[in-house]
Amino acid sequence: MKKEPAFTLVELVVVAATTVILCAVAAPAVWGAYKTSSLAVSANNIRQLAAGGAAYLGDNNYRFWPYRRDGEVDGTKGAIWWFGFEPGKSLGKPEGQRTIDMDHGPLGPYVPRNIAPDPSFGFAGTPFKPKYKHGYIGIGYNVMLSGENGWTPRGGLPLRYWDLQQPDKTVVFATAAQVNTFQKPASARNPMIEEFYGFDDDRGKIPSVHFRHNGHAMVAYATGSAGLIKMNEASMDRRAPEANVGRLSPEVLR
């Protein structure tokens, strides 16, 4: 039987070196395309929410919507977040296994279903800890607009559009996330980034604006326009600096 010729050691080295070079050349292009697609997802989500928010205001005497309240949908009790309904039975499940019904939040009837989970968390530089089974849109709401007590409203009415001194500079939505060090598998030694639903000035919660696009947060203003805001590094959450989580300046929140 005739023996098939094998690769020589030199040929194997050349093939291996060529493969490494091709990977090194292709990887930045693939990574760049992935980041561009993430930017497009954020832009679409922000645009859809801004349009839906404007329609909601028009139907509700130009008053903004609550951030969260307890409620009931079809006989099921749970939490009605600004972006959807979380059934009580879901609230008892571990994060990452919970479900959300986006049709029954205040903006549900106003936002089309082509909003998609943002892939940006995949390259935040910090391990990702999901909250919902099917993903979340990665956008937060300005709780300064949602009522006197924002995060935990106790009867205070949300602001009206006409209460804003500079609606063209008031941020309603922004890319959002928080650094988690207190829920397993996250810990102080293993900080993880997770979805978050809102943001405020420096009075309440930890930093929760995600400057995920090359150090910028994508935002939508009360007038419906959108843009990018660069992070003030002094506001950065130092528990995971590579995640680019920080705060917006107070002047763009009211």
Image: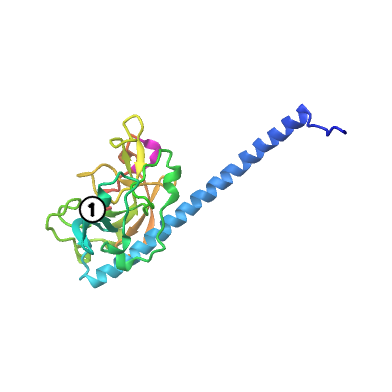
Count of all numbered marks drawn on residues in the image: 1
Q: Where is residue 10 in the image (x, y as percent from the top left)?
A: 77, 28
Q: Where is residue 151 in the image (x, y as percent from the top left)?
A: 20, 50
Q: Where is residue 22 in the image (x, y as percent from the top left)?
A: 66, 40
Q: Residue furthest right?
A: 2
Q: Position of residue 171 (x, y in %)?
A: 30, 56
The residue type indicated by label 1 comes to: Gly
Residue 164 visible, this angle: no
Question: In this rendering, would 121 be left or right of 12?
Answer: left
**Residue segment shown in magenta:** 240-245
Residue 4 visible, this angle: yes
The residue singled out by tag 1 in the image is: 88
User: Mark 1 packing: few (<14 Cα in 10 Å), some, or many (20+)?
Assistant: some
Q: Nearer the viewer, residue 215 or 195?
A: 195
Q: Residue furthest top?
A: 9
**Residue at screen point 22% across, 70% down:** 60
Q: Quadrant of residue 159?
A: bottom left
**Residue at screen point 23% across, 44% down:** 205
Image quarter in which the C terminus is found: bottom left
Q: Which of 24 and 163 is in front in this view?
A: 24
Q: Is residue 185 magenta?
A: no
- Colour option used: rainbow
Q: Does the magenta stretch include residue 244?
A: yes
Question: In this rendering, would 178 be left or right of 41?
Answer: left
Query: Where 106 falls versus 6 (above or below)?
Result: below
In what element is the residue under mark 1?
helix
